[in-house]
Image (spheres, coloured by chain):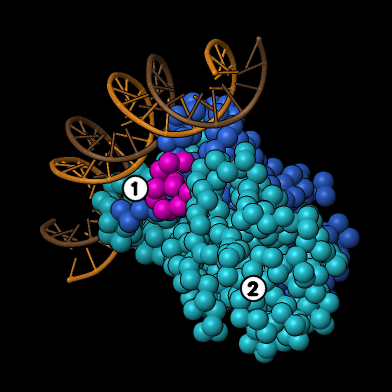
Chain colours: A cyan, B blue, C brown, D orange
Amino acid sequence: MPELPFTLDQLRILKAIAAQGSFKKAADILYVTQPAVSLQIQNLEKQLEITIFDRGGRKALLTEAGRLLLEYCERILNQCDEACKAIEDLNSLKGGTLVIGASQTTGTYLMPRMIGLFRQKYPEVSVQLQVHSTRRTGWSVANGQIDLAIIGGQLPADLENLLQVIPYATDELALVLPSKHQLSNKKELLKEDLYKLNFVTLDSQSTTRKVVDKLLQDSGLEIQRLKIEMELNSLEAIKNAVQSGLGASFLPVVSIERELAAGTIHKAFLADLEVKRELKLITNPSRYTSRASEVFKKNILPQFASLESPLRKI
Amino acid sequence: MPELPFTLDQLRILKAIAAQGSFKKAADILYVTQPAVSLQIQNLEKQLEITIFDRGGRKALLTEAGRLLLEYCERILNQCDEACKAIEDLNSLKGGTLVIGASQTTGTYLMPRMIGLFRQKYPEVSVQLQVHSTRRTGWSVANGQIDLAIIGGQLPADLENLLQVIPYATDELALVLPSKHQLSNKKELLKEDLYKLNFVTLDSQSTTRKVVDKLLQDSGLEIQRLKIEMELNSLEAIKNAVQSGLGASFLPVVSIERELAAGTIHKAFLADLEVKRELKLITNPSRYTSRASEVFKKNILPQFASLESPLRKI
DNA sequence: AGTCTCCATAAATTTTGATTATTCAAATAA
DNA sequence: TTATTTGAATAATCAAAATTTATGGAGACT
């Protein structure tokens, strides 16, 4: 090994002697014996081919070379201390960054609240939210660019068994109607009623749209028979469309909390159909898990397991 | 020993792995085996209670904590390199400071030339000249404030055996007369002639004055009989006084080179009297000797052993 | 001078780190 | 898929380095 001319221990000893003015006192402070100190300094002097201390009288005094070395020594040891502090902060969640992935829907309506709670508890950990498609989010988790992610859709098969997927909450995809729609008065709607509606939907590429389609199909609905008035690429746009009476839609309840409360959108009750999807936490078990990530998973997520209560509280 | 959480070797390994992206390649570069690298990183991770590398695939990737540590690592290792360079420079006389002591006379007339020669050879070593009394100069050498000194007088007895005193040149204290003085025409002067002269001398506290008095007394002169016209505290002032015809004086030849050459001062030849003093180099043998100091003593000083030739050359 | 401190030195022990050999896991190739 | 290769972890052995105990010597203070 191409050796370094000195060790951190030697620098620590050098600093101690310079501060104490004595080999013996330095040894006491460092909890070693005096010969240990002497030998290390001798090694240091041999390696660097300099004399560091004048051991003339009762006090050990720095030579010119010694003073020069001490300057660097202080700087180096300070950097070491800083490094330790930074690492400690990271370990105690007083620093660092947590990178969270989410799809458009969860990223917009759910994550801000989760992140808010996390930041409230660990204000010194910065959180970065990355909103991507489910597919891309999955890959980012796989290659470590994202610590953890919340998704509502289905992962590609190859990622399914590479990542850890933990369902943690159920998100209802509610059938919503314009408040003044005629069917809004009916207590219960049946599948058959759906064929009478005009739908405003997300564009067919979106994860949420795919999920809705699949769920409806799985429950025996002929989705080809559904009339699609228009396709929009934003939930907010759809909400506005519904509120304007342009049609009905299946929307995640998390996204229409305010509108339901305000009564500007009507949520219908479907007697013979439940459209629900699992919200899942995905992580990469084969990768390093940061403390922040652990804590998020263990302490923050459970508070959102039932989507109703915590959201209402806010 | 209250241990440091890491060693410089570990940091070097960390840096190498980060650069190479592989434990094995890092091991090759550092000329050690792969297990050595693995072990050290494991120790590091254990000490700091963090995971530094993700060893998932064929590449070793830094975790967040690893990246954080690497930043400090780079800074620390850079400081180490700088320290080494600074020390090397000091050893190769490409840096550092040489502190030289001298009395008024040598400091004024001799040292500038010596220092000039030294600086010509080692331009990167800065030289500091401290002009003090012989006594104070001696003490400064004793306690290390001055690396070496040139003195012309006698050290206090207690310092004599504490310091190394090396005579290296003879400085003649020449009897000088105004050029137009009547005795300037005589080829040789005798002791008796001195009693006829009016003297302009240094004040009685000065080292050079004491030396002259002692030398004259030792050679049998009755110094009380010498007529002292005035006492001045500066050699330059005395030279001016002599040139102005106010009187004679004993002056170090090194201080009147120019005036002799210009013929504005006359140097008399004393047939039965030689007034010479030893110029001595003093150092502190019990103290660390800097490289610059060594070189000055070994290479520069000998060139001034005969005061005539090197001075003339300039 | 005598005593006390402090540093240097020597020998022995302990600790640490490195190496060889092997196993394990993942990625590449057939 | 299986086989091969590459890289990292592990275990046991071995070498080297640091620490300790014990001791000697040189200044400094009384």
- The stretch of residues the image draws in magenta is B41-54
| Residue name at image x 75 percent, y 83 percent | A182
Q: Of A281 and A95, which appears nearest the observer?
A: A281
| Residue name at image x 62 percent, y 59 percent | A152
Amino acid beneath label 2: Leu
Q: Label 1: few (<14), some or many (≥20) within 10 Å?
A: some
Q: Mark 2 points at which residue?
A: A189
Q: Of A165 and A296, which appears nearest the observer?
A: A165
Q: Is residue B283 rendered to the left or right of residue B174? A: left
Is residue B27 positioned above or below B308 on the image?
above
Q: What element carries label 1?
A: helix
Disc 1 and disc 2: Cα gap in Å? 90 Å
| Residue name at image x 66 percent, y 65 percent | A191
| Residue name at image x 81 percent, y 64 percent | A227
Disc sitting over residue A248 in the figure: none
Q: Can residue A103 be seen in this view?
A: yes
Q: Name the residue under label 1.
A: A38
How many discs appear? 2
Amino acid beneath label 1: Ser
Q: Label 2: few (<14), some or many (≥20) within 10 Å?
A: some
Residue at the extreme right: B262
Residue at the extreme front: A192
For disc 2, the chain is A
Is residue C28 positioned above or below A27 on the image?
above
Q: Is residue A108 rendered to the left or right of residue A197? A: left
For disc 1, the chain is A
What is the x, y in percent for residue A273? Answer: 59, 64
